[in-house]
Image (cartoon, rainbow, N blue to C red):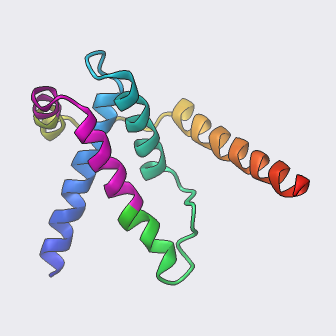
Amino acid sequence: MKKRLLQWAKALRREVLLLWLAARDARVPLPAKLLAALVVGYALSPIDLIPDFIPVLGLLDDLLLVPAGIWLTLRMIPPDLRDELRAQAEVTDWPKSSRLGATLIVLIWLGLAGWAWLVWRRG
């Protein structure tokens, strides 16, 4: 079981890298690029919709939302391009961490938190 779980995690990591490559590829349709960037940002973000310390529910968002986002995004990419990107993801190393990317993710989460606070305050 542990071996299968490790294989699944490695495949998930490769698919996230594939989406990272797709978000940067000019041949990928714009809606797929945007969703790919969103999924990669969420998958790599240290902030979750449901914190991991909440029993069961905390891990469900990672186990359901990320794979569902990957599946949906991959369906939006043309099959031949998807296969090319998958092959590229197999031989590509993970990019070094990006301060700009981390800053954008934090700003997005802060913006969402501010919006939620405004909505809550009005209600």
With respect to residue 93, does 45 lie above or below?
Answer: below
Above or below 110: residue 49:
below
Picture quarter with the N terminus: bottom left
Which residue is found at the position 23% from the left and 31% from the top? 77
Query: Is-magenta flag for residue 79?
Result: yes
Q: Is residue 94 visible?
A: no
Residue 90 in which image quadrant: top left
Q: Quadrant of the C terminus?
A: bottom right
Helix, strand or loop: magenta stretch: helix
**Residue 5 pos. (x, y %):** 20, 72
In this view, the residue farthest toward the front is 123
Tell me, yes or no, whether the highlighted magenta stretch contains residue 44.
no
Instruction: Estimate the x, y position of residue 76 in percent, counting from the top left.
Output: 27, 34
In this view, the residue in front, 118 or 100, is 118
Task: Give the extent of the magenta segment.
Answer: 65-85
What is the x, y in percent for residue 75? 23, 40
Which residue is rendered at x = 29% and y = 29% of the image? 22
- State how many labels appear: 0
| Residue at image point 22% right, 47% down | 14
